[in-house]
Image (cartoon, grey):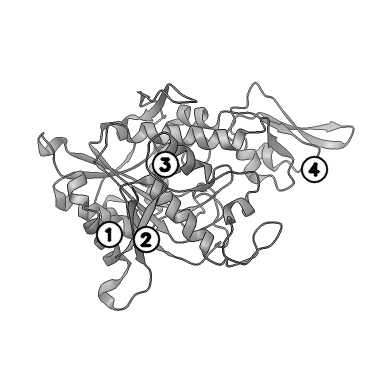
Amino acid sequence: MASSVYLAKLSIKNPKDNKLAKIRRLCKVCRLEEKVKPFEMSREDQLCAIKVHFGERGNDTYVHPTFVREVVDCVRASGAKPFLTDTCTLYKVFRHNGVDHLETAYLHGFTPYVVNAPVVIADGVNSHAWREVAVNLKHFTSVKIADGILSANAMVVISHFKGHAFGGFGGAIKNLAMGCAPQEGKIDQHGRKVTITDFCVGCGQCVAICPQKALSLQETEKGQRCVINKELCFGCYECMSVCKHGGIRIDFPNEYEDFSERMVEYAYGAIKGKEGRLLFITFLMNVTPQCDCAAWSDPLLVPDIGILASTDPVALDTACFDLVTQTPSLRPIGTHECHSAGYDKFQAEHPATRGYHQVEYAEAIGMGSRKYEILNV
């Protein structure tokens, strides 16, 4: 049976049909109030997590806080208590601990005054606030999920659909997987170490960004090259994101598919126990090649398409992927410099990735269905 995916296209016919109105309409047609309304407990205990990505400093294409405010107001109208949340990053820049992360959220406009809700870093100041959730799947018997996520009775997952250097693309599934996991859970998902290739030119960009100080420059027979201390490396892949020469690769040939599967299993754990109390809203706007964790925003892959919502994260990610595939690109993408519609733009941008495997595996473990019906609202 096909899952319903609701699409609000961005064409605006009158002042009453602006993006804020479209968000409210999506919340209404998806019956958000039924997903988050108070259950058999006092209102004081009715907590609804609104999972967002606050964006890395320097990035400007994350979901705008005024859009998030509309979702918050819809949750409040149901009688539940909303709070915005995310987790600490593995890499050590501006969101590695709860204090810096909260400050970054405020700098990007996610203040209680703007969004009408508290902002809570779900895994605590030092990413130690988490619990195990049993999943009994291929890669993990249990996963580590932030306490703030598990403590909420319901959750609205607001995602920005874009590319990702290792997952191919990031949508609702990745937002759940990496975004609901503490640092130790992120290590579980990344999971593999890297190795240096003959393409290394010794530029040192990877050395500067490595959070573990596992990389260094040394003189070799071929000149100055990067070397890696594999005892220190925990596989965050930040070095690969900055290397422009192909000088770093993952040790295992099937790692990109396994990476996707590990993310999906974490996403599965993040929503376990909240069945029937979930809504997923994805902004198919500002579709950049890289994740919002990048401290920049690359030129867009495709024109803005719309805002989508569903109770099925698998159908939602599949629909977003298909819409990007069907839309002509704004610029040459990949080595073949395609402009046309009808091809996987994320794999063209990140050739080694297997982004679509996310939804294949998620469907296989029962998270949802790749079959969907788009309903325009």
Q: Whole-Å distance between the Cαs marked 2 and 4? A: 42 Å
Which badge, 3 or 4, is on the more N-terminal residue? 3
Q: Whole-Å distance between the Cαs marked 2 and 3? A: 26 Å
Foreground: disc 3 or disc 1: 1
Label 2 environment density (alpha carbons within 10 Å; few <14, some 14–19, many ≥20): many
Q: Is residue 32 left or right of residue 62?
A: left
Foreground: disc 3 or disc 4: 4
Residue 223 in which image quadrant: top right
* Dot 3 amino acid type: His
Which badge, 3 or 1, is on the more N-terminal residue? 1
Label 1 environment density (alpha carbons within 10 Å; few <14, some 14–19, many ≥20): many
Q: Whole-Å distance between the Cαs marked 1 and 4? A: 50 Å
Residue tagged 2:
307
Instruction: Determine which of the numbered discs, if any, sits on residue 201 in the image.
Output: 4
Dot 1 and dot 2 residues touching (CB under 8 Å): yes
Mark 4: secondary structure: loop
For the C terminus, which image quadrant? Answer: bottom left
